[in-house]
Amino acid sequence: MKIYKDFSKIDFNRETVLTTGTFDGVHSGHQVIIRRLLEISRKDNLRHLILTFEPHPQIVLQKSSNPVKLLTSISERIQLFEKFHVQNILIIPFSKEFSEINPETFVREYLFEKIGIKKVLIGYDHLFGKNREGNEQLLNKMSDELDFSVETISAQETNNVIISSTKIRQAIINHEIEIANNYLGYNYFLEGTVVHGDHRGRTIGYPTANIKPSSEHKLLPGNGVYLVNSIINGRREFGMANIGLRPTFTNNHEPILEVFFYDFNEDIYGKELSISFLKFIREEKKFPSIEAFLKQLKLDEIFCRKIIPEFYF
């Protein structure tokens, strides 16, 4: 895979098919675009290219006080692109100045003159350029002048629901992790580093790995208990994760992600892990005593262990 981080770094090649977008989540709708991109590349012997942005435009252009939370960091997006066999990625450094480029200039001076295009592939709702004024109609108009073609991929649906990053984010927040995973086409995951916590879990028989997400903009699932897994030292390890404020003990101000891995007793402090969320178990709650808390943890563990075979594939 070749990753370019500036327009000046990529060779001009008129024989190019490209698509552009934020691709947050690289969900099953995005995957249809990617598969079609690769199909055109093979069929017509064209270089294929995905243009994406970092930081995410919503972060740069944030217009509300609520922080933007994303399905994928740029590292996670690259991993997913690679998984789906993308060979060329241009990561555009997004800024307020870049957002002011009008769509005609973007197509003519960047796509056509700097990269070279034979074909442009877009999603059904793709908008681009200053104030998101660029659209399919503009591309079709400019394609006649500049001699390239445009193909639009229709909306992708699951159970009569159009798949979108926004709908997936909402499902994840609402504990609907299995719905989100269905829309994504893979299990939602989070990359992070194992950091030291208060070590309380070890004293009560449930030693947990506290995970600090690699990106401050990463979306955490809604507070509660989940069945999760991770690949550690080449082995798939299952466990249960808690996301929340830990009201029985501390009532933190910010949610913490901690994972208890079953039948696992290795020192993984400082290790980078990818945690995949498989199933929502229950919401977080405050217990009247440590004994009541431990009783519930045991019930959670029994239930999770019972359903683990459903997730072997």
Image (cartoon, helix red, strand yellow):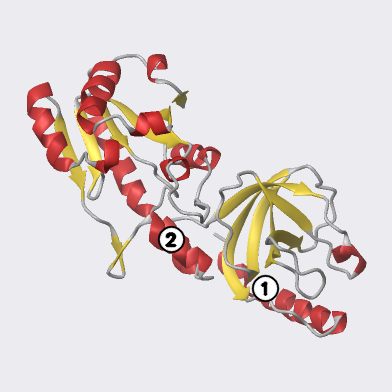
Vertical arrangement, residue 35 with respect to residue 201, above or below: above
Does residue 45 appear anywhere in the picture? Answer: no
Residue type of the residue flagged with mark 1: Cys
Horizontal relation, residue 243 to residue 221: left or right: right
Horizontal relation, residue 204 to residue 247: left or right: right
Pointer 1 local density, CA inside 10 Å: few below 14, some 14–19, many at least 20:
many
Vertical arrangement, residue 130 with respect to residue 205, above or below: above
Q: Secondary structure at mark 1?
A: helix
**The label number, if any, that marks residue 247 in the structure image:** none
Residue at label 1? 304
Which x, y percent locates residue 210?
Answer: 76, 55
Residue 20 vs residue 205, the one in the foreground: 20
Residue type of the residue flagged with mark 2: Ile
Discs 1, 2 touching: Cβ within 8 Å: no
Pointer 2 local density, CA inside 10 Å: few below 14, some 14–19, many at least 20:
many
Vertical arrangement, residue 24 with respect to residue 239, above or below: above
Which x, y percent locates residue 9?
Answer: 42, 15
Q: Residue shown at 86%/58% (left/top)?
A: 198
Which x, y percent locates residue 284?
Answer: 67, 75
Q: Residue shown at 17%/42% (left/top)?
A: 136
For marks 1 and 2, the one nearer the N-term is 2
* Residue 264, image quadrant: bottom right
Does residue 290 appear anywhere in the picture? Answer: yes
Residue at label 2? 168
* Residue 278, image quadrant: bottom right
Q: CA distance from mark 1 to mark 2?
A: 24 Å
Which corner quadrant holds the C terminus? bottom right
Among all residues in the image, which is located at the extreme left? Answer: 144
Q: Secondary structure at mark 2?
A: helix
Horizontal relation, residue 148 to residue 4: left or right: left
Which x, y percent locates residue 244?
Answer: 68, 66
